[in-house]
């Protein structure tokens, strides 16, 4: 008696299950990240947040995610990517419940940090799981839909929060995100588990990296309140911890980050592109709702809808990236995408006092198209530029660079906007646009120079 063979249609459906789960989990992670953009005023009124606490509420989840990404990647590669992925979703669900129940600003900030740690497990192992299921052209399509999840989450978070504000205040979005994260955690048992690496997890490296990145990102957050002794102390601790981390990583058998990968041009190029993306277009677009509210005079919901011209288009562009001409190599796609992001940023210089909200649309649309293509290309490169057994590390390194760049860019833009006074807001906004555009262009120049050096060495 022979076993029933699944039909082709059923096989196709089964093959799509990992992609659907990973893409939705990525979307939820980014929605959790972006949710406070339209709820900051409501949270401030409810919890009496100080200006410093407001800055920390916005920075807490990126800090947790950046700090946890490489450690989560190491856990995924060593102990199992599915296990780490599911653990990340469970942690996000529990932290979202804690955020919704927060009676003080401090508890909300801590909950946001833990949301970031949970998101790190999802972001680090999601691409790694796709890398072990899909290959070749299928992986490129999967990476494009994963990138669509990034844009979809960034787009839906602020709108979802704005819609739910009249229903259950700022807590409602956290309750919904907790439920969805829990459901996805249950469904993720359908994902295949990865083979384990027969080495111990680098505990010392994880602790040092967390200390170093925590202090570095905390310094960038505190920098918004001015250059103080606290900032200097945090930078000092970060430098020492990261220096010791590098020394340790060169000696251990199973490092969190293989430093030799930076001698591999595709890996270094993808990391630089992610850093430039974070410090450039992502940091500027994160402050567009603030610009629309303070500079143009729009309400939170209207500002979030207009921002969809960037984040929503990013989703469409990421999905459609697979239809680009095959003659455009992934490297060329990254070059053109970063250049397009910089062009979109510079178009925002057209905004002046007294002009309508429509003036920002060309810049948002151009930046959205370019950012979608960039996300798809980087998602593919992050997995392809490392050995198969280290795909979670590649994804984690790429996303860590993106978050660090974003923290750097947001700190810079926030300082410029915070220093504005009555009558000169647009002047400082233009300075922010120019500064972040320069970040994008510097990343592009660094990648071109790196590629030239790599060709000379190969010749």
Image (cartoon, rainbow, N blue to C red):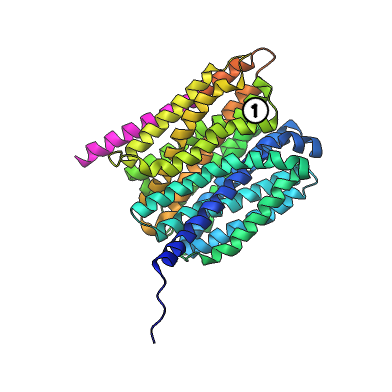
Which quarter of the rendering shows the N terminus?
bottom left
- The residue range painted magenta reads 434-459
Q: Residue at x 56, y 18 (%)?
A: 351
Residue 292, percent from left and from top = 64, 25
* Among the 4 quarters of the image, the one containing residue 158: top right
Can you say whether 182 is above or below 308 in the image?
Answer: below
Q: Which residue is mark 1?
A: 290
Q: Evaluate whether residue 245 shows in this view.
A: yes
Q: Residue furthest left?
A: 459
Q: Closer to the camera, 311 or 238?
A: 311
**Side of 343 relative to 417 (left or right):** left
Which quarter of the rendering shows the C terminus?
top left
Q: Closer to the camera, 335 or 445?
A: 335
Q: Evaluate whether residue 240 shows in this view.
A: no
**Side of 366 relative to 324 (left or right):** right
Circle 1 crowding by C-alpha within 10 Å: few under 14, some 14–19, many from 20: many
Q: Residue at x 62, y 27 (%)?
A: 414
Q: How many marks?
A: 1
Residue 405, percent from left and from top = 51, 36
Residue 196, percent from left and from top = 44, 66
Task: Kindly report the secondary structure that dominates the magenta region of the rendered protein.
Answer: helix
Local secondary structure at mark 1: helix
Q: Closer to the camera, 269 or 43?
A: 43
Residue 213 colored in magenta in the image: no
Residue 442 colored in magenta in the image: yes
**Side of 189 relative to 1 (left or right):** right
Residue 253, percent from left and from top = 41, 60
Can you say whether 445 is above or below 271 in the image?
Answer: above
Q: Residue furthest bottom?
A: 1
């Amino acid at each position: 008696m022979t076993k029933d063979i699944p039909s082709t249609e059923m096989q196709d459906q089964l093959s799509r299950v990992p992609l659907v789960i990973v893409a939705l989990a990525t979307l939820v992670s980014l929605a959790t990240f972006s949710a406070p953009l339209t709820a900051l005023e409501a949270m401030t009124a409810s919890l009496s947040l100080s200006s410093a606490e407001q800055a920390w509420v916005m920075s807490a989840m990126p800090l947790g995610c950046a700090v946890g990404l490489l450690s989560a990647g190491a856990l995924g590669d060593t102990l199992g990517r599915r296990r780490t992925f599911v653990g990340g979703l469970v942690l996000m669900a529990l932290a979202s419940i804690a955020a919704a129940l927060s009676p003080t600003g401090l508890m909300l900030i801590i909950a946001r940090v833990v949301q970031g740690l949970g998101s790190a497990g999802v972001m680090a192992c999601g691409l790694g799981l796709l890398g072990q299921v899909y290959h070749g052209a299928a992986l490129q399509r999967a990476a494009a839909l994963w990138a669509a999840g990034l844009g979809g989450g960034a787009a839906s978070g602020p709108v979802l929060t704005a819609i739910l504000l009249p229903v259950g205040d700022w807590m409602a979005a956290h309750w919904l995100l907790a439920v969805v994260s829990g459901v996805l955690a249950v469904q993720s048992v359908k994902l295949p588990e990865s083979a384990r690496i027969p080495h111990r997890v680098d505990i010392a490296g994880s602790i040092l990296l967390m200390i170093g990145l925590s202090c570095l990102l905390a310094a960038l957050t505190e920098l918004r309140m001015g250059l103080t002794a606290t900032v200097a102390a945090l930078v000092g601790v970060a430098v020492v911890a990261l220096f010791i981390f590098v020394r340790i990583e060169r000696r251990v058998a199973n490092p969190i980050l293989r430093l030799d990968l930076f001698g591999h041009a595709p890996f270094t190029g993808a990391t630089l592109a992610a850093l430039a993306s974070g410090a450039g277009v992502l940091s500027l677009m994160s402050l567009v709702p603030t610009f629309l509210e303070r500079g143009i005079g729009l309400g939170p919901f209207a500002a979030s809808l207009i921002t969809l011209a960037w984040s929503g288009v990013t989703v469409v562009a990421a999905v459609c990236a697979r239809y680009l001409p095959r003659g455009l190599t992934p490297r060329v796609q990254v070059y053109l995408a970063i250049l397009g992001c910089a062009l979109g940023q510079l178009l925002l210089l057209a905004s002046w006092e007294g002009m309508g909200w429509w003036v920002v649309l060309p810049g948002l649309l151009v930046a959205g198209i370019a950012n979608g293509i960039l996300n798809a290309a980087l998602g593919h490169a992050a997995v392809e530029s490392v050995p198969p057994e280290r795909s979670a590390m590649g994804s984690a390194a790429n996303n860590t660079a993106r978050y660090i760049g974003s923290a750097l860019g947001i700190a810079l833009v926030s300082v410029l906007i915070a220093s504005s006074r009555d009558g000169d807001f647009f002047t400082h906004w233009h300075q922010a646009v120019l500064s972040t555009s320069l970040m994008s262009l510097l990343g592009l120049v660094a990648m071109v120079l790196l590629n030239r050096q790599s060709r000379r060495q190969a010749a």
